[in-house]
Image (spheres, helix red, strand yellow):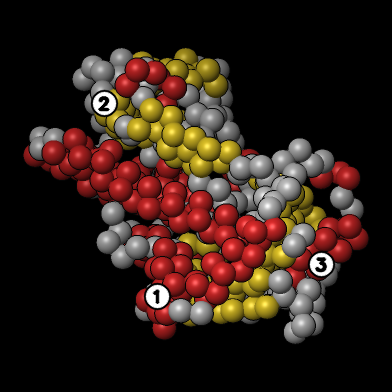
Amino acid sequence: IDTQVAIVGAGPAGLMLSHLLYRAGIDNVVVEKRSHDEIANTHRAGILEAGTVQMLAETGVDGRVLSHGHEHEGTVLRFEGESRRIDFQKLVGQSVWLYPQNEVFVDLAAARERDGGDVRWEVTDTEVRDLTTEQPTVLCTTKEGEKLEIRSRLLVGADGSKGICKRQIPQDVRTDNFIEYPFAWFGILCEAPPSAPELIYANSQYGFALISQRSDTVQRMYFQCDPNVNVDDWDDERIWTELQRRIDGPDGLQLQRGPIFDKTVLPFRSYVCEPLRYGNMFLVGDAGHTVPPTGAKGLNLAFCDVRVLAPAIIEFFGSGDERGLAGYSAKALDRIWKAQNFSYWVTNLMHVQPGENPFNMKRRRGEFETVTNSTYGSGYFAESYTGWQDRT
Ligand code: DHB
């Protein structure tokens, strides 16, 4: 097949880019190794920045985000049982939306299907080559067993943190910026009513817990755990006891319990590949960078990449102007490093390090006061969490 843009990966980043290019009349083909249903059932974070919601709504993917999503005008940071609310609307005049990221994927896939997009699910043996030529190519085998060669003018790697694309950038032109954290998150989904009207990010001597939501009847919660934990060692009773003791406080807040039907462990890593371009290949989303889940920046950041790359590609095919493509990596990285800093900072603010020095616990209490008891401190949190307005 010959196309203008070949996209490897049909997660939210790849599909959003495909959708925007289609709207601009640019031919593109997307290949994905997983099945649609596997991605649809992979639970991710649930918070969308205002700019992400706007992007979905303005480009005709609004589907259900506005009708089924819930606007959150603030969030709660809780330390040793004491809650402090960060009022996003009052501080920065923006909200976030609670709408599961796997539903964003479902909506985008439906939009691509509706518009006749060429998305090949469940391909195998994917390879990319000729990246520094004017005909970068994707090779793969389709679900039906047919060998496919997709010759393009530009190739986009949207194939996630374990993808093949970034590994094609030679070691001597690529910098892998990487840190790991000595903890992970144990995530659950349960059938229960919400325990609180907004999300609660809680720190306690036992570690971090996040009380999030999905709907009136399904809730999402997480607690800091050892990265090597085995979910099968944790029955419902043990999980509820652990979550509850991390939010216990003088206000008597009690979690609404119910049957737990999904348990997963989420690794904690921070990673940035520099640059995000090699020849005629461009990386977007997790293929180029990963954030720890605290702060829910992953998908939002992927959309920011697409918001920079899509107009650059459109301009390139429209007038031949390459300046947007030339500037993509640096422009996207500006925002990526801001989000890396926020995700890293809020992770360290809210978690307890194994074997932590008591000095650090007390210092963190001071940090909590600095953030929550000050318009300026909470303003930084609110601005970062809801998404920097420059939108680049
Ligand atoms: C959710 C996940 C996050 O990482 C976060 O910061 C907020 C919410 C969630 O799954 O609901």
Q: Note whether 107 is above or below 156 in the view shown.
A: below
Q: Amino acid at mark 1?
A: Tyr
Picture coordinates of residue 328 (x, y %)?
25, 40
Q: CA distance from mark 1 to mark 2?
A: 43 Å
Residue sitting at x 68%, y 78%: 82
Quarter occupied by the N terminus:
top left
Q: Is residue 285 visible?
A: yes
Residue sitting at x 63%, y 50%: 43
Picture coordinates of residue 374 (x, y %)?
46, 79
63 vs 312, left or right, is: right
Quarter occupied by the C terminus:
bottom left
Q: Which numbered disc, 2 or 3, marks the residue closer to the eye?
A: 3
Q: Which residue is mark 2?
A: 280
Q: Is residue 221 visible?
A: no
**What mark, if any, has residue 245 been given in the picture?**
3
Q: How many marks?
A: 3
Residue sitting at x 64%, y 65%: 362
Which one is nearer the viewer's eye here, 114 or 18?
18
Q: Amino acid at mark 2?
A: Asn
